[in-house]
Image: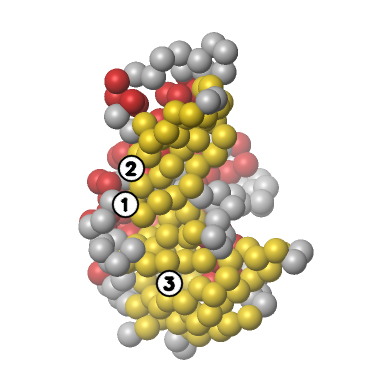
Amino acid sequence: MELITVKDLSLQNEGYFAFKHVTFSLTQNQIISIVGDSGSGKTQLLSTLAKLKTADSGKVEFTPGVRIGYLPQFDPQVINKSVRIYLEEIRQLSGTLAVSKEQLKGLIAFMGMSPYLDRQVRQLSYGLKQRVNFLAAVSGHPNVLLLDEPFSFQNSKYTSNMLEIIKDLADNGSGVVIASSTQDSSITNYFDANYIMKNKSMEQVKDKDKEILCMLIFTVKPDSMTLTTEISQYLSANVSSLVELKIPLGMKDAIIKEMIDLNYQFEGARILEG
């Protein structure tokens, strides 16, 4: 059963497209991945699906009874409540369809948040806040879960734990959309469909197993060091003062860090389809 149907959806901000002509559907038991560079429109698209923004054209149809759980990339709220009180209040707002108090306690422990229960949410690091907001998003037992950069600043253990919770929701009839700027090849098996945000539009990657690539662009500085053998294998162009690297998307953050350590100036990235 289709939970969300998106038809030719477009949104503009001050005369510029945030995204345009997006068409896709989300069904029960489905996990969708949307990857795109910063500013590609994926965050604005999820905000629209979460009913926080109104599109300028096109249509979003929700099946009756849809309950949306939403994790924003950046939560503007300053939450002065403790993690314990905040999550319990969110759980109660969802009424009888929410997870039980004991189930929430188990989820909190599974996500490694038990030591922080009496800490105010506003005092937490970005990575810990993401885990709190993830727990808030799933505590209502939504049948549509929208996640924007859920794995930011998470180690492999908690990324894996998030994915287990996401998969459990999908196995029990929910549909999930995950937007991210990187995608590690180790998690692609969790996704039933992959999309790329390019040129403000969304394109489906027809071959589910096809690797998504990324082009990184750097400026050579006077004190830039020689590229390592590991990085040189990804060299696409080295012209004048510019270096371009064509890499698997999941390596994006690690390669950028290594190149900056070698005193190259990062200029930008763009998503490619492998």
Q: Amino acid at mark 3?
A: Val
Instruction: Say above or below: 167 vs 222.
Output: below
Residue 235: x %, y % from top left:
36, 31
Say which residue appears at 54% left-offset and 11% top-offset. 223
Place of residue 250 in the rendered image (x, y in percent of width and height, measured from the top left)? 35, 42
Residue 274, label in figure:
1
**Element at label 1:** loop
Q: Is residue 95 visible?
A: no
Q: Which disc is residue 144 wearing?
A: 3
Say whether disc 2 or disc 1 marks the residue closer to the N-terminus.
2
Residue 264 image point, x, y percent: 52, 22
Disc 1 residue crowd, few under 14, some 14–19, many 20+, Cα 10 Å: few
215 relative to 45, above or below: above
Q: Is residue 64 left or right of residue 47?
A: left
- In the image, 61 versus 236, the foreground residue is 236
Label placed on residue 175? none
Mark nearer the N terminus (1 vs 3): 3
Distance from the alpha carbon under mark 2 to that under mark 1: 8 Å
Q: Residue at x 30, y 40 (%)?
A: 157
Numbered disc 3: secondary structure: strand
- Picture coordinates of residue 8 (x, y %)? 53, 80
Residue under the point 59% across and 62% down: 44
User: How packed is label 3: few (under 14 Cα within 10 Å), some, or many (20 or more)?
Assistant: many
Mark 2 or mark 3: which comes first in sequence?
3
Q: Nearer the viewer, residue 163 or 263?
A: 263
Task: Judge by depth and name the residue closer to the eye, 124 or 155.
Answer: 155
Task: Return the mark for residue 248.
Answer: 2
